[in-house]
Image (cartoon, coloured by chain):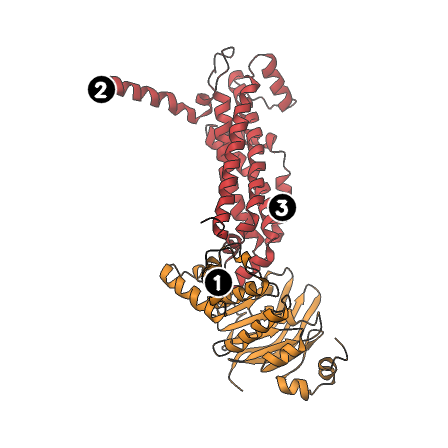
Chain colours: A red, B orange
Amino acid sequence: MAFRRGIARYRVTQLLPLLVWVGVLAGVGRPHGPPDMGPLLASVLTALTAVAASAALGVAAGGALAFSPGGSRWRGPLSMSAALPSVVVGAVMLHWLGDAFGLSPGIGLVAAGLALLCLPQTVLLAQESFGRCRATGEAAQALGARPSQAAAAVYGFVRRELMGILLGVAGRALGEAALVALLAQGLLERGRLALQAGTTLASALWYLEITGRLRDARAFWPAALLLVLSAIAAGVAAVLAGERREGRLR
Amino acid sequence: MSAAKISVENLSLWYGAAQGLKDVSVEIPEHTVTAIIGPSGCGKSSFLRTLNRMNDHVPGARITGKVLLDGEDIYARGQDPARLRKRVGMVFQRPNPFPMTIYQNIAYGPRVHGQRSEARLREIVEQSLRRAALWDEVRDKLQKSAFELSGGQQQRLCIARALAVEPEVLLMDEPASALDPVATAKIEELTESLKENYTLIVVTHNMQQAGRISDHTAFFLSGELIEFGPTRDIFTRPRDRRTEDYVTGRFG
């Protein structure tokens, strides 16, 4: 019994640190150690969280805006926000949030940042998709439906496009999460901020590479595959839900 | 003439700088069919959409004047358009079923308005489909996609869907213009049977159809209501020369 409790305590103490960068980025303090799963795990978890958050919020907001009077007024600000260079902004935001609120830069924080950065793009694309079904949405509103209920009524028409949106957001989130994870690893190992004046993302990565601190890049392929498969699974689930509503599946 | 269900007082509508309706005043009697006729772009559909505030969704649209439903101004501050649309239903020019089953299409409206009981929903679905003269054709395929129906059946499904929320007024914007003559005849028969329980306002381009189905007719031209009266009078003894020219086919 004591042995089992010891094992359980060991697992808890080993797994809990995974929730923050320091724990995720194993190998800190032993930069020349063998490649590990730290950045891989961090990238996948961060990206998945960001995708889930931005897809859910973005699709709902896009649908509601498409059928709200004056919803088109948001298109300009959303387009501009979607065009922000999110890799740099995300990395800076990570530190700004850390400095401003004294938060530890963990998966949750980075995922929230990424979700926020992916959100304008998701909202915009969802708004466009739902907007193409305006006639049917109007028919729902003529029955007394609110904008969000009208969006739910036309969901079956846009489910395939939404799958594409999910895939796009997933790809973006994975790429950016991986870069942020690499950067964070570099920051932790070097003990200082990499994004100083005159330091670009590329030069930071190059520095990590030549000093042997960049982990085996091939380790990201399984992560990419896993994320794409997850996004496809989410998309297929969305499509099947639409089929069920249409009555093609019984 | 029966009591007025809808009273429109000095209604004007603008889309940005362009005026769509000019100082329209009319009283629509209860439990009758009113046809709205006029050439393209004369404001028929715009007028219809002011009656359930569907123009609220058009950017730049604004109105002046009053629209009273049972004496209550539907544009007054605090009026909820969603609640209004439960009382004033609408059927559009083209059939537009939702991407759902036939059953779900009909149950959608009541569900939106809070009906959760499946037993009650089944009753509503059957009753609405019967009223729309569609029950016998679809009773065995309620769980099939609404897109498996023909165009005429889809339009009757849309009418059944509108009836399912138990409106008092039903607005129909050229409901038969995309249908063949057989399906059109069914929609016309349906219109006649529905007026016992509802007040119907039908926009149509088809003068014969207006003559067949309506009790009253309103003639619009360039955003103005030129003439309103019993259909027989409009078609046989119009007071205005422009109405006569239109109904006799001199223009339009």
Foreground residue among B35 and A55 = B35
* Mark 3 or mark 2, whichever is nearer to me: 2
Among the 4 quarters of the image, the one containing residue A83: top right
Q: Which mark is residue A1?
A: 2
User: Which residue is outermost to the bottom?
Assistant: B237
The x and y percentages for residue A67 are 56, 55
Q: Do the residues indicated by labels 3 and 2 lie within the same chain of the protein?
A: yes
| Vertical order, B122 against A31 (above or below) | below
Chain letter of the residue beneath label 3 in the structure image: A
Q: Do the residues indicated by labels 1 and 3 lie within the same chain of the protein?
A: no
The x and y percentages for residue B129 are 47, 67
Q: Amino acid at mark 2?
A: Met
| Vertical order, B238 against B107 (above or below) | below
Foreground residue among B35 and B18 = B35
Can you identify the residue that label 3 sits on?
A77
Real-space CA distance between mark 3 and mark 2, rounded to the nearest whole angstrom: 61 Å
User: Which residue is outermost to the left?
Assistant: A1
Q: Which mark is residue B138?
A: 1
Q: Amino acid at mark 1?
A: Val
Foreground residue among B98 and A170 = B98
The x and y percentages for residue B207 are 67, 78
| Vertical order, B16 against A110 (above or below) | below
User: Which residue is outermost to the top?
Assistant: A32
Q: Earlier in the sequence, mark 3 or mark 2?
A: 2
Chain letter of the residue beneath label 1 in the structure image: B
